[in-house]
Image (cartoon, rainbow, N blue to C red):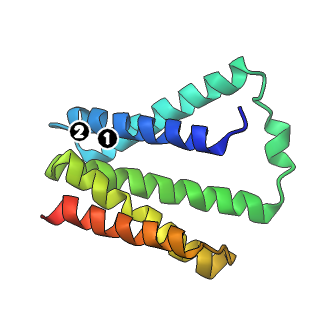
């Protein structure tokens, strides 16, 4: 399966399921502890999947250049902070509003990819980004 759109659609499905399950799971629990438990569950499941598919290769990580390892480590930090903020937001707000604002990350990604990576979008794609921003605002604040 090399179709990125299929993988991205599966990610969206699991992200939606994640939001609903977090909303149920964080009731009466500290958001940080909930995030820690989620993170441990993710690490265990991912290790089992890699092990089962024969792709658990520590040597491969050792061969990554230092800038790549640093970027992955910072990505992990950003992920942890994002998950913590998301869990706390779900404790306090409606799942649809929280998820909508979280998807503003798509708008930020488009802007940062342009500025930092030089990735270009055409006019139609920028219109989609703008509509996503408007849609997130409407769901979250109206």
Nearest the eye: 108 or 23? 108
Q: Secondary structure at mark 2?
A: helix
The residue lying at 51 percent from left, 40 percent from top is 9
Question: Cα distance, mark 2 to mark 1?
Answer: 6 Å
**Residue 49 as seen in the image, left or right of residue 34:** right
Nearest the eye: 24 or 65? 24
Which quarter of the figure is the N terminus placed in? top right
- Residue 57 lies, in percent from the top left, at 80, 33
Q: How many marks?
A: 2
Q: Which residue is mark 2?
A: 23
Nearest the eye: 61 or 19? 19
Please say if 25 is above or below 68: above
Which quarter of the figure is the C terminus placed in? bottom left
The residue lying at 43 percent from left, 36 percent from top is 13
**Residue 106 as seen in the image, left or right of residue 96:** right
Q: Residue furthest bottom?
A: 115
- Residue 122 lies, in percent from the top left, at 59, 73
């Amino acid at each position: 399966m090399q179709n990125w759109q299929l993988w991205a659609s599966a990610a969206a499905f699991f992200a939606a399921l994640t939001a609903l399950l977090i909303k149920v799971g964080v009731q009466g629990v500290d958001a940080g502890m909930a995030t820690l438990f989620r993170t441990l569950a993710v690490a265990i499941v991912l290790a089992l999947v890699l092990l089962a598919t024969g792709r658990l290769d520590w040597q491969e990580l050792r061969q990554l250049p230092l800038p790549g390892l640093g970027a992955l480590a910072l990505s992990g930090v950003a992920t942890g902070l994002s998950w913590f903020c998301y869990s706390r937001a779900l404790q306090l707000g409606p799942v649809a509003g929280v998820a909508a604002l979280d998807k503003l990350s798509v708008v930020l990604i488009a802007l940062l990819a342009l500025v930092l990576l030089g990735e270009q979008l055409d006019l139609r794609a920028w219109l989609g980004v703008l509509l996503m921003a408007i849609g997130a605002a409407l769901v979250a604040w109206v």
